[in-house]
Image (cartoon, helix red, strand yellow):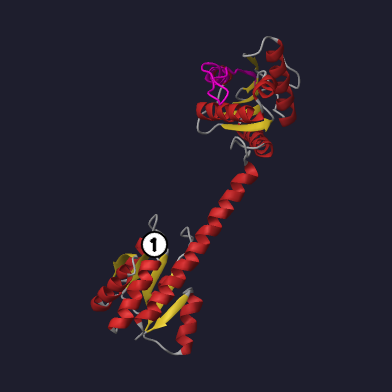
Amino acid sequence: MSAKAEAALLDADRVWKPSPLDAVLLAEDDPVFRHLLTSWLRRWSYTVMAVDNGLDAWNVLQQQNAPQLVVLDWMMPGMDGVELCRLVRSHSLGPYRYILLITAKDDKHDVVVGLEAGADDYLTKPFNVDELRARVRTGSRILKLQDALLRTQEALQFQAAHDALTSLWNRSAILDLLQREVQLHRRTGGSFGVMMADLDYFKKINDSHGHQVGDDVLREVSRRLSTSVRGYDYIGRYGGEEFLIIVSKCEPPDVAANAERLRRCVSDSPISTAAGPIACTISVGVVAVPQQAEELPDLGALLKTSDSLLYRAKNNGRNRVEVAISARTSAG
């Protein structure tokens, strides 16, 4: 490479800085060529993991956080590049692997064989170093686009199932989770509990301090509730200042104790807001479904009963828990 071309490559590297996605698995059995390729890739700021055969490359690709950009020589001992391409494409290995196949075969039929085996691109030896750099960068760019699309998809999926204000499960999602819990109970007879919680005197907070402070209070109450349930329980914003909580694998005495803990986590300390500290409490209506309950629980009945118990708690002075050990449609 001429000094002018070398300087041009270095200037381009100063502008373009690879992301953490730019790790490369290099499989090449020729030690001299492997060293040369590794030097080039590292000069272009890639992190390189180099092996000398296809079997070792396959073992690396099965590891967690393996490189997504793969440069393979066609002819290697143990397993050649084409065999490895087929193996990668026939298995689910997490994120997509972009494979650049390097080959001394220049027959068009061989190129087609490599691409049909699963290679995304190929280079024929001997090749120009600038072309290698361009093709590797193309693979890196495609992987970045894939990563951006996956992140967007995850964000959209989160938004579709979560409340925008509190980041809890939204009404539709929490009802789906409750229906799943009901179906699980019908199959296995396991115990669980349903809680309907409502923030006491929330309208007064909005009227006295404004909706922005009201939103801050809702977010903090949501945070306290979500950090006070177990990792395998569910909590969602049912509507307004009302929350629906599902406690799995929990017998009635423990369901009641969990509800009391949730009540205390809200009432024990005021919430700091722009308007100053605000004391808040919740009222909770609880339906505990024991193992092998005599009546099979029904989603509508659970919601109706927990809601009725919630309003009993309100009528009995608020900041309290009311519990029923049944899945009947009326409280008591």
Of all residues shown, which one is farthest toward the left? 32
Quarter assignment of residue 241: top right
Q: Nearer the viewer, residue 238 or 252?
A: 238
Q: Which residue is mark 1?
A: 67
Q: Residue at x 48, y 64 (%)?
A: 143
Q: Quadrant for residue 123, please give it.
A: bottom left
Assess whether residue 259 is covered by the magenta stretch.
yes
Q: Residues within 10 Å of mark 1 (few under 14, many from 20)?
A: many
Bounds of the magenta segment: 258-286
Q: Report if residue 137 lies within the magenta region.
A: no
Vertical side of 4 occupied by 229: above or below: above
Decide if residue 282 is in sight here.
Answer: yes
Q: Looking at the image, is 267 positioned above or below residue 107? A: above
The vertical placement of 324 against 121, above or below, is above
The image quadrant of residue 286 is top right
Residue at 39% x, 62% y is 67
Quadrant of the drawing holding the N terminus = bottom left
Question: How many numbered markers are drawn?
Answer: 1
Location of residue 158 in the rendering, given as x and y in whole percent from the top left corner: 59, 45
Q: Residue at x 41, y 66 (%)?
A: 69
- The front one of 225 and 249 is 225
Whole-percent x, y for residue 171 in the image: 68, 36
Q: Position of residue 230 (x, y in %)?
A: 51, 29
Horizontal side, residue 325 vs residue 146: left or right: right
Viewer can see residue 79? no
**Local secondary structure at mark 1:** loop
- Left-right relation of 143 to 283: left
Residue at 34% in and 69% down? 44
